[in-house]
Image: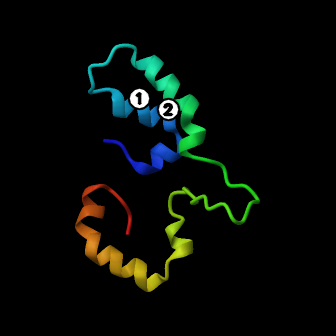
């Protein structure tokens, strides 16, 4: 299956996995086109403080959320996190 972390760290590989089950002509061309457009999907952060660009680094929630919030989310979504192989 495909994971968010792979999408934001290795977009081409993620696309190859994602697109594999679909019967499409020229899958490689589609992947190339989408990879070329990836700066629009995953813009780089700049020094412009008034321009909101979310940080897409996997695990960054640990820097943004209180430990008590993370604990509560882990309790709520624990079964799903376990099923998908995410550490709590």
What residue sits 35% from the left and 34% below the top? 18
Are circles 2 and 1 on residues that touch, CB within 8 Å?
yes
Q: Work out whether residue 32 or residue 86 is closer to the camera in this orientation and state it.
A: 32
Query: Residue 79's spot in the image, x, y percent?
Result: 23, 66
Q: Is residue 44 left or right of residue 6?
A: right
Of the numbered discs in the image, which one, if any, rests on residue 12?
2
Instruction: State which quadrant residue 70 falls in.
Output: bottom left
Task: Looking at this view, name the residue that lies furthest to the top.
Answer: 25
User: Which picture quadrant has residue 17?
Assistant: top left
Position above or below: 58 against 68: above
Which residue is at the far front? 50
* Place of residue 43 in the rendered image (x, y in percent of width and height, measured from the top left): 61, 47
Task: Find numbered disc 2 in the image and state the secondary structure of the residue it sits on.
Answer: helix
Residue for point 54% across, 74% down = 64
Disc 1 marks which residue?
16
Q: Badge 1 local density, few (<14 within 10 Å), some, or many (20+)?
A: some
- Place of residue 7 in the rendered image (x, y in percent of width and height, measured from the top left): 46, 43
Where, by quadrant of the figure, is residue 88 drawn?
bottom left
Would residue 80 be found to the left or right of residue 36 on screen? left
Quadrant location of the N terminus in the rendered image: top left
């Amino acid at each position: 299956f495909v994971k968010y972390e792979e999408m934001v760290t290795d977009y081409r590989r993620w696309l190859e996995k994602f697109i594999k089950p679909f019967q499409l002509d020229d899958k490689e061309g589609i992947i190339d086109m989408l990879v070329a457009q990836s700066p629009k999907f995953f813009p780089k952060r700049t020094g412009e403080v008034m321009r909101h660009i979310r940080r897409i680094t996997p695990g960054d929630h640990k820097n943004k959320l209180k430990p008590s919030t993370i604990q509560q989310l882990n309790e709520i979504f624990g079964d799903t996190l376990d099923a998908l192989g995410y550490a709590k």
